Amino acid sequence: MFYQNHINIDSLKAAQDSLRTIAEKSNSLNTVTFDLSKIGNDEIILTVLGYGIVFLALLILYLFFANLTKLINITRKKRLKAAGKESSDKDELPISGETTAAISLALALQFQEAHDFENTVITIKKVQSAYSPWNSKLYGLRQNPKY
């Protein structure tokens, strides 16, 4: 009897300790504070370094995409010179914008027209399956009892 009471008292104490711990944790979670004195030099260095890397990567991407057309024109001029053809001194392509737009419109209309006459034959095949009482609807119907 003493042993059984001792186990009950121990389990009650353990349950009370668990509840007390949960109550303390829930109270500490509800009171979130921000203390500037806990921020050290390592955290500041890590933050500045992280933001610096991100902005440096964005700057490099911006410079790359801003100068991409110049790079393409330089390589195009080198290829034309190697082939023995003279290139114009302008940085622009020798084809005007109106001509490019007309060619683009003609290609778009051509590719759109190819999809107008598609074969739309639908075939339905009836599949015969063997009889099985598992798929029989007859056994699923309710029959009212006769009085």
Image (tube, rainbow, N blue to C red):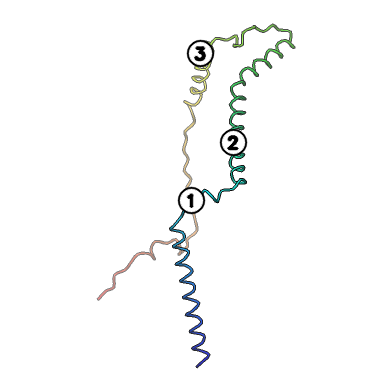
Give the mark count.
Answer: 3
| Viewer-side residue, 114 vs 129 | 114
Residue drawn 58% across and 42% down?
A: 47
Tell me, yes or no, whether the two marked residues, 3 and 2, touch with CB atoms within 8 Å.
no
The residue that mark 2 highlights is 54
Q: Amino acid at mark 3?
A: Ala
**Residue 4 place in picture, x, y as percent:** 50, 89
Crowding near pointer 3: few (<14 within 10 Å), some, many (20+)? Answer: few
User: In this picture, is 12 found above or below 2?
Assistant: above
| Viewer-side residue, 89 vs 147 | 89
Q: Amino acid at mark 1?
A: Phe
- How many angstroms separate mark 1 from mark 2 (CA)? 26 Å
Pick whichever of labels 1 and 3 is earlier in the sequence. Answer: 1
The residue that mark 3 highlights is 102
| Residue 60 as seen in the image, left or right of residue 125 | right
Crowding near pointer 1: few (<14 within 10 Å), some, many (20+)? Answer: few
Tell me, yes or no, whether the two marked residues, 1 and 2, touch with CB atoms within 8 Å.
no
Which of the two marks, 1 or 3, is nearer to us in this view? Answer: 1
**Residue 62 place in picture, x, y as percent:** 58, 26
Pick whichever of labels 3 and 2 is earlier in the sequence. Answer: 2
Q: Secondary structure at mark 1?
A: loop
Name the image quarter holding residue 46. Answer: top right
Task: Report the residue that reaches farthest toward the left.
Answer: 147
Q: Secondary structure at mark 2?
A: helix
Which of the two marks, 3 or 2, is nearer to us in this view? Answer: 2
User: In this picture, is 124 found above or below 88?
Assistant: below
- How many angstroms separate mark 1 from mark 3 (CA)? 62 Å
The residue that mark 1 highlights is 34
Residue drawn 49% across and 23% down?
A: 112
Which of the two marks, 1 or 2, is nearer to us in this view? Answer: 1
**Residue 68 place in picture, x, y as percent:** 62, 21
Residue drawn 61% across and 24% down?
A: 63
